[in-house]
Image: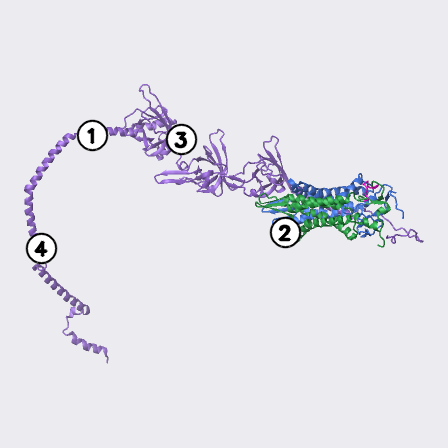
Chain colours: A purple, B green, C blue
Amino acid sequence: MSEQNRPTDAPPSPVPPVPVVRRPRWNVGLIWLVPVVAALIGIGMVAHNWASEGPSVEISFITAEGLEAGKTQVKYKDVVIGLVDSIRLAKDRTHIIARVKLDKAASSFATTDSRFWVVRPRFGTTGVTGIGTLLSGAYIGADVGVSSDVSKSFIGLERPPAVIHGSPGRRFVLRAADIGSLDIGSPVYYRRIQVGRVVSYELDKDGKQMKVDVFVDAPYDRYVTVSSRFWNASGVDLNLDASGLKLSTQSLATVIAGGVAFQSPPGPRDATPAAEDAEFVLFDDLQTAMAPPDGEPEYLQMRFEQSLRGLGVGAQVDFRGIVVGRVVSIDLDYEADKQSFPLIVGVVIYPQRFGRAGEKIAQLGKDESDKNTRMAAFVKPLIAHGLRAQARVGNLLTGQLYIALDFMPNAPKTEFDASARPVQMPTVPGSFDQLQEQMTGIVEKLGKIPFESIGKHLDSTIVQLDKTLRQVNDSTLPQFNATLAGAQGTLGSAQQAVSANSPMQQSLAQTLAEMQRAARSLRALTDYLGVHPESLLRGKPVDPALRDAPEKNSKGNPP
Amino acid sequence: MTALAPRAHELGIVGCHTCGSACSADLPRCPRCGSPLHRRKPDSLARTWAFLIAALILYIPSNVLPVMYTSMLGRGEASTILHGVVEFWKSGSWDIALLIFIASVAVPSTKFLVLGTLLVTVQRRSTWARQQRARLYRFVELIGYWSMLDVVVVALVSALVQFHLLGTAEPRLGIVFFGLVVVLTMCAAMSFDPRLIWDDADGSE
Amino acid sequence: MTLYPALVVCEHCDSVYRKHDLDHDEVARCGRCRAVLYRASRLDIDHLLALTLTAAIVFVIANVSPVIRITVGGMHNEANLLQAISALSQGSALIVGLVAAATLFLVPLLQIVLLGWVLLFARAGRRAPGFGFAMRVLHHIRPWSMTEVFLLGVLVAIVKLSGMLNVIAGPGTYATVVLTVLVTVIAKRDVRILWGRLSGDTDVEWGT
């Protein structure tokens, strides 16, 4: 084949010298730069990764729903700050532990008071949140606190916190008897706009009250003043009164989800903004919230002999139309000596509801330390003046009763035992019973009226009247007729005197004509005098027409 | 080239498939690399036919069945290979459309045609255009594996487009058949012995 | 007389030729079928080993860093070769996933590892332990190495997705480009010359 290129085996006659062969001192070929460069790039990438790698933290959640190792991100204010590295079950299998690699820039999130929670779509009564995660999948939300103590393990919140750390606004504590329909995230309203939300709630240690934390955003937090009142704005407030049916809610959302509203009571109030974490009472509704504060209640006991059907616990105690307290107990008693079953009604009175009167009362008995003694000392003279308690009908249709405190001037005198505890308030029978008594009294009085003699007297009086009338008819009436005829004649002559063609009328007309002429000549005189006032002094000229003409000529044509 | 080189079997030599060394024909194994020595690839024609027919059968479902399922905002759509080519063409990127068409349609079809032709001509001991046929075989060997392109694209797209409701992509059964077609045609090409093209020539010479 | 190192047999038509030293850029072709018999090796073992080492480093980078990163509306996702293969391997597509794993990941990895192993010893002029096995495996897996197909697939996927989404080619793409070049240079090249160079057995010369 290609044989011609091969060198011939026969050596040429002059032997050529061997070239200088030397090993290069630097044996490593340039080709090795290539892997070195590749290695440098690789190391550079690893170093960059390592440098940008932040701390790893472990967050425990109840469930790993929506979380995905290597995919689920950790976000703070929608900025990615880390990635879920792995998810594993805790040893006791009660929760899961998500290992999160935070970015270098987010290493401040590995501190003790950071909070983490899973953001997934939530359809709650307060609205729909996390709808974006429907498309993108769940992520872990993060919130950083102020602490600088490093922590590597966290307990994830099961629901997003209502307030992110550092949000402008203030936190307040509300004390309520129960939580109602409130929940974390329930809105807080001020004049029907949402200004905050419920952050958390917990039961008091003794289990008697709820402590509800609310957060009010700036700038609305300054409307929470020391005199603000909070009330539970949940549900619908249906009010039927003289002005008609009134239905009020804070918003449609609160009907379902509940909410808290606050406002200052009307009138001049202390408008100092409330301090952070100030405590308020959470009232049941707007009305109780706006009602003046009740203060310490005073306890009174009453004793009724008659049936109290229609009186219930909670019924109002009324003093001159003002509700000052309520019934707290109704008990049946038995008195063996009288063989009677009196009813013992316990009521509480709120002295502050007496307004100014209450303040004065408080002034009167302030040197007494014991509440009951003070009360007894105060009511004793009033009872002497007729202060009594009475069960009255509040509603004729339903027969509901209330307790009225009032002065009964004609009440029977009773002994007031000032040492009895609790203070006993004497009673008078109820208004219905009293009405019955009064009616009986009226009927008795009516019976005493001497209807028979009155009838007889009336009869004789009528006979007398008849006689008198007959006398008038017989004597007085004819005389009266004659007088009337005389009067008629006088009137007829008077009429003649003023008729149109009577002499008196004619002479009157002549006199008037004279007067008219006199007036005319008088006018001519005054006119003349207006033009020639000098005539008053010189007298009237003889022939004014002749003298006037030459005079005019001489004046009109001067020489 | 003035004269043609002698054939190996005329010299009693067998070329090792693995290390390419020339060995004596009487050896069962290559003394250098230890691989078994064959004068020709064993059962070359039968194996090639088998692979080719299997590939041809699978080629039908691979084109009829969808290779990928994509859903965008809840609206799902399954697309076949040709459907993807047409969509690329319509959207204006005719170059990509052409590329996918060549890799996914033209290459497998060419392989079927070329290998079929080679098999038929070899079986008929045809002496027609041997050099061209040998070149054709080398061409088929060269382009064969580029058909895997579609498999790679489907894999990448389904790994990337994972946005839950917003959009997802996942492979469908068609891509399995298509992948198998590629593997089978490659096997067919490998089991074909191009030396068979020349075998009869020496006999006639 | 069992082995004839001075002879070369055409794989495609069984023609026998005598070996002939080639200058640079020269290619020995078969006179009968025009197939390539052998080429002049431009790279020596040193160069090959350096490139194999480079390929190993680049292979790691290409498979660790994301190849494509897509973003849409604040969300983002990225994938590398292995994630793509695992996405393909779900459900009924497991078979094709295995094929992809073999051709795109396993075969190139084996090529790099075995070649590096063989060349490391070859540089010292020795046969590596398991040299024969490694060389045989290298020969058999060579047609199944599809790194360049993966590269083309990445490019097509980028074009395909860029119509609807924001697509960024990650560092893995660039690493794949380099890897494709390197694997083509080191593994597609006929490594059979190592058989001859490191022949420790008795070669029999074909008499001229």
Q: Give a yes or no on whether discs 4 and 1 share a subunit.
A: yes
Image location of residue A196, percent across then percent down: 48, 40
- Asked if residue A203 lies left or right of residue B30, the reply is left
Name the amino acid type tagged 4.
Gln
Which residue is found at the position 83% from the left and 44% from the top? Answer: B14
Q: Which mark is residue A296?
A: 3
Q: Tag on residue A446?
A: 1
Q: Disc 2 marks which amino acid?
A: Val
**Which quadrant holds residue A304?**
top left
**Looking at the magenta stretch, what is its main secondary structure?**
loop
Q: Is residue B179 depicted above or below A522 in this figure?
A: above
Q: Chain of mark 1?
A: A
Query: Which amino acid type is shown beneath numbered disc 1?
Result: Leu
Mark 1 element type: helix
Q: Residues within 10 Å of mark 4 (few under 14, many from 20)?
A: few
In front: label 3 or label 4: 4
Q: Which residue is mark 4?
A: A495
